[in-house]
Image: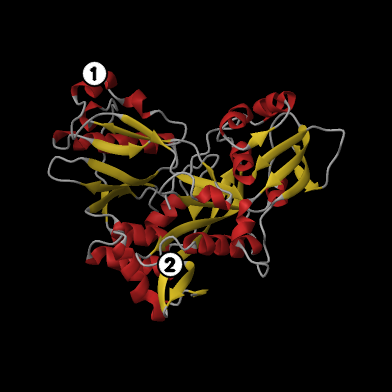
Amino acid sequence: MEIVTYQPEQDEKAVMRIFKEVGWIENKKQEKGARIYFNGQRALIAKINGEAECFAGTMPGVIKYLNKDLSFTAVTGVVTSRIARKQGLAGKLTARVIARDAAEGALVAGLGIFEQGYYNRLGFGSGVYENWINFDPANLVVDRQVRTPQRLTADNYREIQQALEKRRRGHGSISITKINSVQAELHWIKDGFGLGYFDGKNGELTHFIWCKSDGEIGPYEVVLYAFQEADQFLELMALIKSFGDQIRMVRMREPAGIQVQDLIKQPFRWRQLTQKNKFENINRATAYYQIRICDLIGCMRKTHLPFGEAQFNLKLSDPISNYLDNSSPWQGVAGDYIVTLGKVSNAHPGTNPDIPTLIASVGAFTRLWMGVRPASGLAITDDLKAPQELIMELDVLLRLPEPKPEWDF
């Protein structure tokens, strides 16, 4: 077995086979999307008998911490063939691509998960719940006329990428800056279509929806969307309402800070009437992505909390080093630090016997720092321990908006 850099001209056929084996590619259109996706990755593969049997790749991006964008690396694909399971290859490759990107300046890493627990072994911690709400579009209470939108196709990937990058973004929002991510996604989505408005000063796409359809009466799923201001969001909801003559259910992820239930007529009535139905009106929540700090000192320098200050020792553990050999220039962020959180935050190696100590895994500390859950909650369910006085202080200090990525990867 050897681990090498993915070379499209040599390895595409074998990697395509792996993706088909695991069910990620089902048709020719998705094959085209996969090729775009492969070419946008910085990937490593594990070869057995000269052919790729495990693949792990990343794409660059940014993650917003309050009002600052931090460099981010998205692990956009980890896949292992049928013959290479249970050999630890996925963990090794994922650790290596993260170490490479961290050594080159990525402050934070993130990935989507197939199950909770696996990537905790690489120092990741779960993000917040994403709310996916199912509703009958005819029940939307959006009182406005619908302008005629323009049709979007996969050929509009550049305009869609730009609209996503310029969308209204809040704390925790992520943008993948490699255009292959969106371009591939538009091909991957089965029966997808887009509608949008080109209202920018120079005719740029400002707000849009990209949907996946399922039959004559739906359901429809809003897979991608973007808007820059409140009025544009309401226009998109009015557009979705216009589907209601024929489509019986739409599913979409709630935008950060917006409660879609506010815009639905009699939500509980329709939830009861459609229970256990293909068109069930319901709100489901799940945390399906994870993040981790890759550079503690760099992240603290970018942290500017609007009120209060706390100083503490941090004993930080990081299990990713178990998957890296001595040749890796980055070995995780484990160590003893003195941390200050406030309007000016910082961290540096050392300990101070005169201040309290927080003991945490990097995954738990990342969740605390991002505001996924308060210290008092993480002390119960995650790997985080501190004196009660410090826990209470951190609960008040880190009162942050929910960190919503609003970009699947």
Seen as rendered, the residue at the extreme front is 86
Residue 30 in the image: above or below residue 218: below
SS for callout 2:
strand
Residue underneath mark 1: 269
In the rendered image, residue 11, in percent from the top left (x then y), is placed at: 40, 77
In this rendering, position of residue 122 left or right of residue 30: right
SS for callout 1:
helix
**Badge 2 or badge 1: first in the primary sequence:** 2
Q: How many marks?
A: 2
Badge nearest the viewer, 2 or 1: 2
Nearer to the camera, 247 or 402: 402
Residue underneath mark 2: 54
In the rendered image, residue 312, in percent from the top left (x then y), is placed at: 78, 36
In the rendered image, residue 115, in percent from the top left (x then y), is placed at: 42, 46
Nearer to the camera, 126 or 176: 126
Residue 177 in the image: above or below residue 243: below
Nearer to the camera, 367 or 342: 367
Residue at left offset 22%, top offset 63%: 27
